[in-house]
Amino acid sequence: MADRVTALARTHFASRAELVFHPQCFLTDGHFAGDDGARAAALADVANDPAIDAVWFARGGYGSCRILPVVLPKLGPRAREKLYLGYSDLGSLLAGLHSAGIRRLAHGPMPADIIRKGGEAAVLRALSYLVDKDKAALEPHVKAGTPHAAFNLTILSHLIGTPWQPDLAGHVLMVEDVSEHMYRIDRALFHVTSNEAMRKIAGLRLGRVSDVLPNEPEFGKSEEDVAQHWCRVSGIAYLGRADIGHDADNKVVPFGA
Amino acid sequence: MADRVTALARTHFASRAELVFHPQCFLTDGHFAGDDGARAAALADVANDPAIDAVWFARGGYGSCRILPVVLPKLGPRAREKLYLGYSDLGSLLAGLHSAGIRRLAHGPMPADIIRKGGEAAVLRALSYLVDKDKAALEPHVKAGTPHAAFNLTILSHLIGTPWQPDLAGHVLMVEDVSEHMYRIDRALFHVTSNEAMRKIAGLRLGRVSDVLPNEPEFGKSEEDVAQHWCRVSGIAYLGRADIGHDADNKVVPFGA
């Protein structure tokens, strides 16, 4: 994956983009790409390195919440200047960086998306945002002057009530999810919209909820039904769909205004 | 199930226990036993009825969080006097009742446990607690004078940061779970132990984590590994195992001291 993404970047951006994959990306420790210490140290390495302009998280899965308590205190002034891009499980780190006052954050494709059908387009979209801040890469509802944020819904739910819950007052929040039962989508929306601080968002946009696992009996409500239900209950404005998700069409959502 | 449980109660407790199944228990609405309004109204009915001594939740599944915002404001003074018993998804209601100041709450078997292998023993254990406050029904670590509480871990995670998060300062907290991937158990423990108020519990006991879904690759850590990890990170005392779980051996844990 790293070789394919590097070749793609070279073809399309020549010397304007140099990708450096940290050796940690190739480690294996059970479920994880290296143990918590190795993953936290790698992130601190690249975040604090003045020669690096942006941190592009390589892939999702599970585990970024585990390094939050360790890595955030290690981030110095250089870490505050650069851009961070990722999605899915990396929402834990986007939220943690946000809670640490770091503001150049974006939700969007990662290098590992190269293996999806049509994945080259996703990777090129991310690169065009990272290198050129290409407006064509952005989720089409993102407007200058309106603060936005985007998260995997399940990940955001697991940050509610922790020190890393992002303060999204006044933000349009976009959420997406994948490979969950519809009752879990409903429960995560109950959770996120029941938190007092989350009720201060400007509104909710629902990204794609893909590969929903079968429910026995049928849950009987769609993702838009349950999103509208919890927006109604919580007094949050439901703003419609968002062009984000676990797929090659996933657009970039920069955090903030 | 209702007939079998009723017959069992009659055989063992004769006229000392009269079970009344609310008609709502037999409704069907997609995934749910009646729509949110019907389920909330049924709970308010039995909770506010002076002729009823205890509310024994009939079964888990999913949906009790959906009625929280509706049912709690409907509970009058009679609802505060009686005992409530259930577990699994019903943790949402136990927590909601706790946050409303209702204190006669217990985590333990439900009528639907009758269909488990050995389920009659579970149902009789619950009845012996409901009718006789039989000490043999209690989880063996429960001690008079020490406040306890028990929850399904995933349900508790989805209450963190909501108005229904129970204040468990000074309580020994027991958690159990079923049919989750180990990475989800790890993530839920990250979540619960990262909340500031939850760090005020007296300690954590780990119930059974059964029917763990396969992880690819192997997660490489057991439920006790991840419980001990997050207790260490959060400064919460890990107190060992608890005799609760989604099985016929599930013991009763009364809330409070």
Image (cartoon, coloured by chain):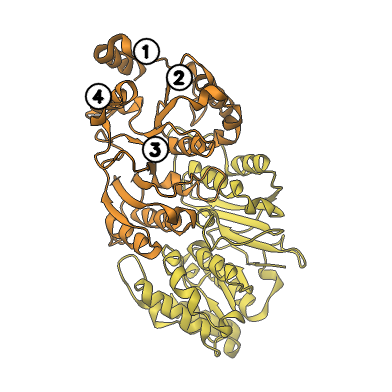
Chain colours: A yellow, B orange
Are there few (<14), some (14-19), or many (20+) residues within 10 Å of tag 1?
Answer: some
CA–CA distance between discs 2 and 1?
Answer: 18 Å
Residue at point 54%, 78% (across, down):
A55
The answer to which of marks 4 and 3 sits earlier in the sequence is: 4
The numbered mark, 3 or 2, whose residue comes first in the sequence reads: 2
CA distance separating discs 4 and 3: 24 Å
Kindly identify which residue carries mark 4.
B120
CA–CA distance between discs 3 and 2? 29 Å
First reached walking from the N terminus: tag 2 or tag 1: 1
Closer mark to the observer between disc 2 and disc 4: 4
Q: Under tag 4, what secondary structure?
A: helix
Residue with the mark numbered 2 = B26
**Label 3, on which residue?**
B255
Task: Check disc 2 and report its element: helix, strand or loop.
Answer: helix
Q: Earlier in the sequence, mark 4 or mark 1?
A: 1
As shown in the figure, which amino acid type bears the numbered disc 3?
Phe
The disc at residue B18 is 1
